[in-house]
Amino acid sequence: EVQLVESGGGLVKPGGSLRLSCAASGFTFSSYSMNWVRQAPGKGLEWVSSISSSSSYIYYADSVKGRFTISRDNAKNSLYLQMNSLRAEDTAVYYCARVTESYDSTRKQYYYYMDVWGKGTTVTVSS
Amino acid sequence: EIVMTQSPATLSVSPGERATLSCRASQSVSSNLAWYQQKPGQAPRLLIYGASTRATGIPARFSGSGSGTEFTLTISSLQSEDFAVYYCQQYNNWRGAFGQGTKVEIK
C-alpha cells in the first residue's frame, strides 16, 4: 500500500524549533519529488516547500524562507522539515505529499500533481 | 508570484443538482491545474490534474475544464459524499499556490 506517515508535531513556544518527519512506503521514494503543505485551523491549504527527487531543487514559500529547511534521505525513504524560529502563525496541520509527474503526449506537456498525502501532524506554537 | 482565486466561497446545492466551481489564476498556468477535495478532519484528495484529467478512482460526475487563467470544476449530480471543500492548485512552477477553497454545502 502506498503510504505517507508524518510525525514530529507538537506544542512549541514561539522562537522554538521542531523537526517533522514523513515516512514513505509502498513506492520508490527516490523517484518522486515531495512537498510539505500546511493548513492553519479553519483555514485553507498553503504550499510550504518542495524538494526534487535527488534534492537538486528546493523551493520555499516566502512565509517560511530562511526559517524552514526541507530535506530527504532516500536511503531511509524519509522526508523532513526542520522548522526554526517558529511563530504563532506557523500553527497548522502539516501534510507531506508525493508529487507525480505525468506527460500528456497530445498537448506535449508535463503535468505535476500531489496524488498521495499523509494524514498530517499538528504543530502548535504557543507560549 | 501566481495567485489563485476561487469563487464562490460557498456554494449551496441540493443533492442531485449540478455544481460549478471556478478558479482563476493571476497569470497563465497553461493546463497545469489540479483540483482537490477535502472533508473535515481528512487530508486532501486529488480529483483532477492537467485541468481536465480525472485521477484514478474518481467518478465520472467530476469534470474539469479550462486553460490559461480560467478553470472550472463541475460536479454533474451531487451525491451526499461530495459535500466538502474544493481547492484548485497551480503547478506551472514549483511554488504550487492553492486557491482559498470553495465549500460545497447542502441546500
Image (cartoon, rainbow, N blue to C red):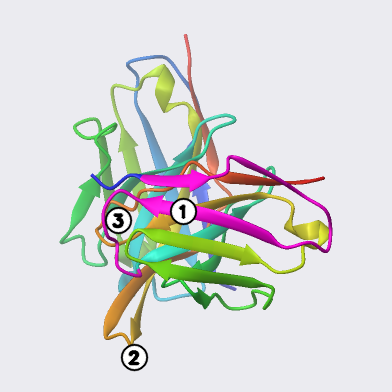
Q: How far apart are marks 1 and 3 (CA)?
A: 33 Å
Q: In which image quadrant can residue B21 be found? A: bottom right
User: Are the residues flagged by discs 1 and 3 from a single subunit?
Assistant: no
Q: In this view, does A122 lie above or below B2?
A: above
Indicate the secondary structure of the residue bearing disc 2: loop
Tell me if residue B34 comes above or below residue A107 in the rendering. above
Q: Where is residue A106 in the image (x, y as percent from the top left)?
A: 34, 91
Give the residue drawn at x 17%, y 58%: A57
Q: Nearer the viewer, residue A94 or B91?
A: B91
Specify the label residue A72 is tagged with. Answer: 3
Residue B14, how many percent across, how many down? 83, 53
**Residue at the image point whose x is 72% and y is 63% from the top:** B18
Q: For mark 2, what is the residue?
A: A106
Please indicate whether residue B103 sits to the left or right of residue A75 in the image.
right
For numbered disc 1, what is the local secondary structure?
A: strand
Specify the amino acid type for callout 3.
Arg
- Residue carrying label 1: B23
Q: Do the residues labelled 1 and 3 touch (CB within 8 Å)?
A: no
Nearest to the eye among marks 3 and 2: give it: 2
Tell me which amino acid carries mark 2. Answer: Thr
Give, as a three-letter code, the residue at label 1: Cys
Q: Residue at x 32, y 16 (%)?
A: A15
Segment tinted magenta in the rendering: B4-31
Of labels 1 and 3, the one closer to you? 1
Q: How far apart are marks 3 and 2 (CA)?
A: 34 Å
User: How far separated are the C-alphas under marks 1 and 2?
Assistant: 24 Å
- State which chain disc 1 sits on: B
Question: In the displayed structure, does residue B73 sit left or right of residue A15?
Answer: right
* B22 in magenta: yes
User: Is residue B67 magenta-colored?
Assistant: no
User: Where is the N terminus of chain A found, in terms of image quarters?
Assistant: bottom right
From the top left corner, tell me how far across and down residue B98 is, in percent. Answer: 42, 48
